[in-house]
Amino acid sequence: MAETNFRLFQKAIPTNVITGFLGVGKTTAIQQLLKTKPSGERWAVLINEFGKVGIDSQLLQTDDSAEGEIIIREVPGGCMCCAAGLPMKVALNQLIAKAKPDRLLIEPSGLGHPEEVIAVLSGEFYQSIIDLRATVTLVDARHMTEARYREHETFQQQLRIADLIVANKAESYSQSDINALTAYLNEMHLQELPLHITQDAKINPQWLKPKAKFNQVIWQGQPTVFNLDDKEQAIPDCGYLAAAQKLSGWYSYGWRFKTTYCFDYQPLLSWLEQFKQIRLKAVLLTSKGFVAINQADDALTIEKSLGQSVESRIEFITDKPIDAEKLENQLLQIGEIRQVNPS
């Protein structure tokens, strides 16, 4: 791992971990927080995605006025805290050295291990560099009756390390959802944690300020081998590249397309209708320009992308295997390689 001279930093960087299970709105929460950044400050964001394609950094595109003040680093492909935290340390050191940030936001994968992320940040090496502030855990109260959430070790871990809990998507809650959440927190002996009910993943910047209470160096298991080569594979002449993986009982299926690959907008919208039960995110070049797509919990959002992505990317995350070949064929039928100037 390349050495970085952190003695150049005069004070430790206020750092918050924003965690939560798949599809709960972590990336949207960070988008909202970036809008609150004080003028003149430089913020850095470290994202770990479950899927291998890497889309969240493109979804976090900022407007031109923030250019140079927000630096984003992405570590796709599972859990960046494996291998004794080495991938995370490499990415974190590179990000700090490049950005020299006034604040650092870290988004672990929805299936990553937040205790190990905290372990890295609170380790001896970073004690004078990282000022660990409140860890925010987002939850969706509608899932409290589902065993795949209640009984999942990562979900429980995300709650245990929280300094405050944010129940997002409140516009879709019933009172029974809130009651189920509070009952579950009581069951885990976490009833003393501050609980905020919000929608659109809005986090009050004041919630970030308190010191983190969970700052113990804890490892859940033996380190595993991790490929530290983060150079992306070149897309072949056919115009696209597929990537898939299985981890912690979940599956990801993703595709990257060359910059000359364009999707017909209306057929794309029709095709997306079949995925109401599947976690899906994408940034795609279409006949109407670049669009950002997010599908979670029956809610599909399509927005014009703030920036122009280098390439189109799409990823599905499910708790059951799906027919990737069928998906790929359908994608290829609604897109083609051509030169397009997005509007």
Image: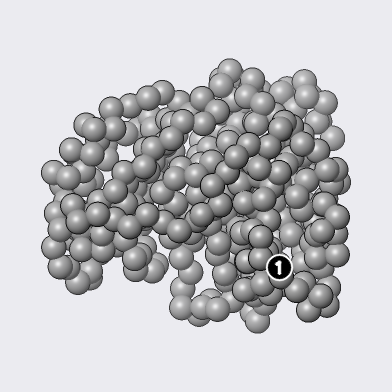
Image: 16 above or below 176:
below
In the image, taking residue 266 as reference, residue 71 lies left or right, namely: right
Question: Badge 1: how crowded within 10 Å, few (<14), some, or many (20+)?
Answer: few
Q: Residue at x 37, y 54 (%)?
A: 233
Q: Quadrant of residue 188?
A: top right
> Which amino acid type is marked by label 1?
Glu
Q: Position of residue 285 (x, y in %)?
A: 26, 59
The way the protein has been coloured in the rendering is: one colour
Please tell me which residue lies in front, 7 or 152. Answer: 7
Q: Residue at x 38, y 29 (%)?
A: 277
Whether residue 204 is visible here, answered yes or no, is no
In the image, taking residue 276 as reference, residue 74 lies left or right, namely: right
In the image, taking residue 248 as reference, residue 129 lies left or right, namely: right
Q: Residue at x 66, y 42 (%)?
A: 83
Q: Position of residue 103 (x, y in %)?
A: 71, 67
Please tell me which residue lies in front, 129 or 205. Answer: 129
Q: Quadrant of residue 332?
A: top left
Please tell me which residue lies in front, 200 or 284. Answer: 284
Q: Position of residue 303 (x, y in %)?
A: 35, 57
How many dots with numbers?
1
Question: In which quadrant will I find the N terminus?
Answer: bottom right
In the image, taking residue 184 as reference, residue 193 lies left or right, namely: right
Q: Position of residue 46 (x, y in %)?
A: 60, 58
Whether residue 222 is visible here, answered yes or no, is yes
Question: In which quadrant will I find the C terminus?
Answer: bottom left
Residue, disc 1: 3
Q: Residue at x 84, y 46 (%)?
A: 215
Q: Secondary structure at mark 1?
A: loop
